[in-house]
Amino acid sequence: MDSAACRTLLSVRDYNLAATLDSGQAFRWAERNGAWEGVIDGRWIQLSQTSEGIAVQTCAPVHDWCWLERYLQSDIVLGSVLSTFPDDQPMRASVAACRGLRLLRQDPWECLASFMISSTKQIVQIRQIVALLCERFGAPVPTPEGCGTVFSFPTAERLATVSEAELRACKMGFRAPNVLAAAREVAAGNIDLNRLRSLSVQEARDVLMQLRGVGEKIANCVLLFAYGFQQAFPVDVWVMKALRELYFPRRAPGPRRLRHFVETHFGPNAGYAQQYLFHYMRTRQPRTRPAPHPASTRRARSR
DNA sequence: TGCCAGGGCTGGG
DNA sequence: CCCAGCCATGGC
């Protein structure tokens, strides 16, 4: 009996789909008419939140949904993760602000390339650059009627053949040579991204950091978002802000002390905790800046 | 308009 | 070890 279908329902609780797909860990999801459209493993897919869980629509019939469950990590019981968080005020506030936020399990190359692009870029811009990269160097994937043309994320092999100028034309700026070099290393087999799964966190981190343009932060993002190393704790400007304002409001600790803190304080799912802090800092309303009075127009533009 | 963005590398104390 | 300056680019 063939049970292939283009629709299914993943029954899962405590899953905030919008927050998860739009939380700066993946950069290709777009919301349209209340549903989220994206590409996973070269397949177009549409996801929408329902009271039962996540409704799924694909273009081609699917026999086995395990690739999707793996990407969404829908079998994780969120409560068992949250219960390992430290019981302090910042974590309570962060979890309360966005119950249901999850970590995805992405493709390593797409994740690595995307975060190499991410440095000193706003999330909106990262999305633009990744979109350009896909349009120009990705392969078209089948889509339903009316969804336009959608492209897969370009493989390392493909990017290894393009020029630095072509990458700069995707608004990559100074990151272009690094992304190109990484694509060539991966395509040539000098770095085997699949092999990293079998290594320890530290060993895998060391391999990633051999790439120019990949420091501790980007390596940790890939370890966390693509490989599922839950201890990995990326510290970007937002998480740094959270650490400083919420944990060390009096005196900012030096890098040494701060590093020790994040490695010891957040428990076995530190990376998950990090994602809650990140989301909390980015979405909470700005500090008490008085709301502009309706009548007070913004400073009259002098000529 | 200027500040800042899911940083990393280099060179100087 | 710690820090400043630099690297492109565009959002707000």
Image (cartoon, coloured by chain):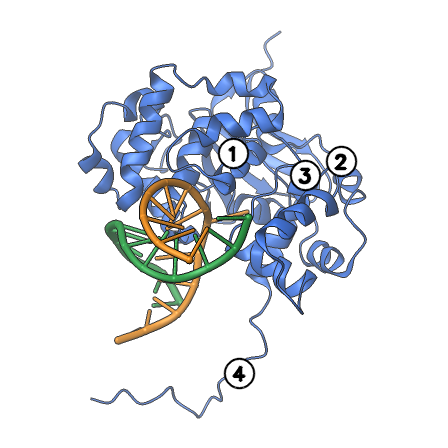
Chain colours: A blue, B orange, C green
Comparing marks 3 and 4, which lies closer to the viewer? 4
Name the amino acid type tagged 4.
Ala
The answer for which chain carries disc 4 is A
Residue linked to disc 1 = A222
Which badge, 2 or 3, comes first in the chain's sequence? 3
Quick one: label 3, few (<14), some, or many (20+) residues within 10 Å? some
Secondary-structure class at tag 3: strand
- What label does residue A291 carry, if any? 4
- Relative to A183, A163 lies left or right: left
Q: Choose the circle earlier in sequence order: 2 or 4.
A: 2
On residue A53, the disc is: 3
Judge depth for marks 1 and 4 and give the one in front: 1
In the rendered view, does A138 fall on the left or right side of A285?
left
Point out residue A220 in the picture as x, y percentages from the top left corner: 55, 37
Residue that label 2 marks: A77
Give, as a three-letter code, the residue at label 1. Answer: Val
Q: Amino acid at mark 3?
A: Gly
Dot 1: what SS?
helix
- Determine the chain carrying the residue at label 1: A
Q: Position of residue A52 (x, y in %)?
A: 71, 40
Marks 3,1: beta carbons within 8 A:
no
Q: Nearer the viewer, residue A298 or A109?
A: A109
Q: Are dots 3 and 1 on a single chain?
A: yes
The reply to whether dot 2 and dot 3 touch (C-beta < 8 Å) is no
